[in-house]
Amino acid sequence: MIMTYGFWGLLIAGLVLVIRRLALAWKARMATTTGAQTTEFLKQWYVKGEITGKEFRKMRRPIQ
């Protein structure tokens, strides 16, 4: 009986770890993609004169 609980416990823990790792990898990939796109939008706004240099530098900082 203990072996059965141990087996299911390890299986569930393994699934949780795999799902967590996939979620973190997905989140990191999305942050990189979004950051690159945001920087491009900021560059366009800066060139058009819609934002100042100070605003551009402030918005480019990563959000933590």
Image (tube, rainbow, N blue to C red):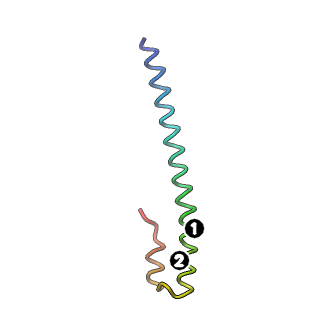
Question: Which residue is the extreme one toward the top?
Answer: 1
Task: Give the residue at mark 2.
Answer: 42
Location of residue 9 (image quadrant): top left
Up/down of 40 relative to 29, above or below: below
The x, y position of residue 32, in whole percent, is 55, 61
Calculate the distance from the C-alpha at mark 2 to the C-alpha at mark 1. Answer: 10 Å
Up/down of 34 relative to 56, above or below: above
Circle 2 Cα neighbour tier, 10 Å, few/some/many (<14 / 14–19 / ≥20): some
Task: Give the residue at mark 1.
Answer: 36
| Residue type for callout 2 | Leu
The x, y position of residue 10, in whole percent, is 47, 26
The x, y position of residue 28, in whole percent, is 53, 55
Up/down of 46 relative to 25, above or below: below
| Residue type for callout 1 | Ala
Q: Could you tell whether 56 is left or right of 37 in the image?
A: left
The quadrant the N terminus occupies is top left
